[in-house]
Amino acid sequence: MKKDIHVVGAVIINNGKILCAQRGPDKSLPYKWEFPGGKIESGETPQEALKREINEEMHCKIEIGEKVDHTDYEYDFGIVHLTTYICKLIEGEPVLTEHAEIKWLAPNELELLDWAPADVPAIEKLANEYSL
Ligand SMILES: Nc1nc2c([nH]c(=O)n2[C@H]2C[C@H](O)[C@@H](COP(=O)(O)OP(=O)(O)OP(=O)(O)O)O2)c(=O)[nH]1
């Protein structure tokens, strides 16, 4: 049995652009693009986990809005259950800490990046529903 990995991702929208983050070379899914976030710890709600992760890895605070998508994707290392939420910055600006790179892109530019496979359905939704 593969392990279940429950993950939350933040679709942070600022001035009509979405924050995209590239995984580093030493991680699983090296150089793939993802939404900042991470694993839900035991006892946390998805929202609490997302606020904690964004504070830790981007040094900023967010307000969490509607859910974008939920996907279950089987990787060789486990099954990722990814839920993404629309988020808004309420304090600070995202900074580069553990990612290789960060970029702000318009919804219709998202499909140009090489996303982690679990993210592809969310990317398609965002490109269709949030086009400017
Ligand atoms: N944060 C985040 N993780 C994602 C996304 N899409 C996706 O498949 N993942 C995967 C990558 C990781 O295996 C896992 C999130 O774990 P994490 O962010 O807490 O841990 P990590 O990068 O240190 O992961 P790892 O090297 O231990 O696998 O979910 C996404 O959009 N955002």
Image (cartoon, rainbow, N blue to C red):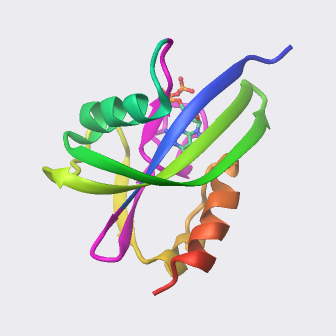
Q: Of 84 and 33, which appears nearest the observer? A: 84
Relative to residue 7, is residue 87 drawn left or right?
left
Residue 70 picture location, percent across and down: 67, 47
Which residues lie in the magenta part?
13-42
Badge count: 0
Q: Look at 27% across and 30% down and name the residue there.
A: 56
Q: Of 24 and 10, which appears nearest the observer? A: 10
Where ligand 1 lies, by quadrant?
Answer: top right
* Residue at the bottom extreme of this rendering: 132
Q: Look at 86% across and 13% down and name the residue there.
A: 1
**Residue 117, can we see it?**
yes
Location of residue 22 with respect to 46 vertically, above or below: below
Residue 39 picture location, percent across and down: 51, 26
**Residue 26, can we see it?**
no
Relative to residue 26, is residue 87 drawn left or right?
left
- Tell whether position 66 is magenta: no
Q: Quadrant of residue 114?
A: bottom right
Q: Of 21 and 27, which appears nearest the observer? A: 21
Q: Quadrant of residue 128?
A: bottom right
* Residue at the left extreme of this rendering: 92
Relative to residue 55, is residue 72 drawn left or right?
right
Q: Look at 33% across and 36% down and name the residue there.
A: 51
Q: Look at 78% across and 28% down and name the residue there.
A: 76
- Tell whether position 33 is magenta: yes
Residue 109 picture location, percent across and down: 51, 78
Residue 92 picture location, percent across and down: 13, 50
The quadrant in which the C terminus is found is: bottom left
